[in-house]
Amino acid sequence: MGNGKGERMRWNHLTLILLLVAFVLVSAWTIEHSPSLCFDEGWVLSVAKNWAEGHGYNQYLLDKPVPAKMLNIGFPAIAPIALSFRVWSVGIWQGRLPSLLFSVGSLLLLYFLSSRLFTVQVARITLLAVFLLSGVLHPLIWGKQAIGEVSATFYLLAGLAVFLVGGRTRTLLVLSGVLLSLACVTKQQFLPFVTAALFAPLILAALHKSWQQARILVYWLGSMAMSFLVLVYVQRTLVGDEILTEPGLYSSTAFVTVPSVRLLALLGLLIQGLPTLLGLSYACRRESFQYSSRQRITQLVLLTFSLSWMAWYVLCSVGWARYLYPCLLAASPFVGQFFDSLIRQMRRALEQRRVWAGLVTTLLVAGLVIWSGSFTVTAVSKNLSVRDDSLIHLAGFLNGLKDGRVIESLDMEVFFMLRTRNYHHPPDRVQLLLNKRSFLGEEVVIDYDPLAADPEYLVIGPASRGWGVYEPVLKENDFVPLGRAGNYEVYRRVRPGKKERPPS
């Protein structure tokens, strides 16, 4: 009997190792070109590059440092990237490597949390659900991108794991609070949901006059609050008081009431997050709202965080897919629990020869796997089958141009690849107006003159093309085509008196 248990444990460990090794190998193989480096990554990597090269925690504009006040990612995500640049030099894979490591850590933590909160069987199903049912939010797609959601989710899961291991030890309570605060500083949208999650068991303990549990939870919450204030002070020391102060930033991303956006967010959840929605519903139905053990408290915290985040995504957020990523990962243990329950029901029905009950349960499991699995296969195969090196070729071309010439673009990933810092992009207020016009459908006037910085070259990539900010100057033939690299077009300025018509 002991040998059988040991054999199962070895099989569990082998399965975990094989899944993680496969994930790392595929991610490492595609880390530079799939998916293509995006606009948001350009912000992050540019600041990390400047920091690593000793130019401060800044963005650059016309070869002068400017505060990165639109960068909605904190230094706990930037610092590992800057360190990677210092160790391995500056490049795409070096900038994405920390996110890949954070993702591997998150998968290990999910397995650990699921096995401790439920069973090892649930832990196995949890990882399988993450790999098979994540749709466009698959870790192979998002898990290696240099975005704050990846590292913040790791800090969140690590904080809960530390609490689960030693929730009554003050040192570990403080460490758990620090990790949770790192998540909140990395992505400040985590703060209300983490706070609500910690208050949920505290309120229950107070209502039931369980003062010993309440003291532990107050200490935990206080540790997170104090460390959060310290980390915010460090963040403001690096960036200044201007971080995330651009008027309209939150109203265009965090609190959006446009009906069409709300409908798209709901449809996105139903399409990409149906297993998560069902898993959380099942967990709510079974939740006894107890706080008598670390396991029960951790379950309640994780459930409250996931539910509150999902409610915000559907009711208030701008509806971008990446905003659903932390919720889907954090809630995956409940998805594993839900599928484990369905599988056990199916087995019992078959053992008891209740054919119809077994058939219905089997069809439900198969339907969910086919529904979400089809989106997953399509999304992953599409991303992994495309090798996009256009940004690397573009950078080689631009870096070969004469120094001192201003390059204009709204594609921030281009600037990360340049040797020069003599580039220019629209100011933050213009980007917010573009967000409102493109994503919220608002009729706004874009008052921006791309010629004001006297650029010699103009680069039009996915972001610039999508926002349409440079269409007026192209229609006026102020620039003529110079070359193309994949999704990027390079134009050269036509000076007054030398106006040329672009080639047909």
Image (cartoon, rainbow, N blue to C red):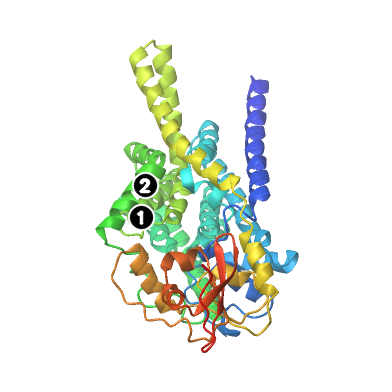
Q: Amino acid at mark 2?
A: Leu
Whether residue 76 is visible here, answered yes or no, is: no
On the image, the x and y values in percent for residue 31 come to 64, 53
- Tell me the residue at 36%/38% (across/down): 278
Crowdedness near tag 2: few (<14), some (14–19) or many (≥20) residues, C-alpha within 10 Å: many
**Residue furthest out toward the bottom:** 497
Tell me the number on the disc at residue 313: 1
Evaluate whether residue 72 shows in this view.
Answer: yes
Which percent across, then down, holds residue 435?
Answer: 38, 68
Q: Identify the residue shown where x is 29% and y is 52%.
A: 263
Q: How many marks?
A: 2
| 319 versus 44 height, above or below | above
Residue type at the position of mark 1 = Tyr
The quarter in which the N terminus is drawn is top right
Task: Identify the residue under disc 2.
Answer: 269
Direction from residue 463 to residue 406 in the image, left or right: right
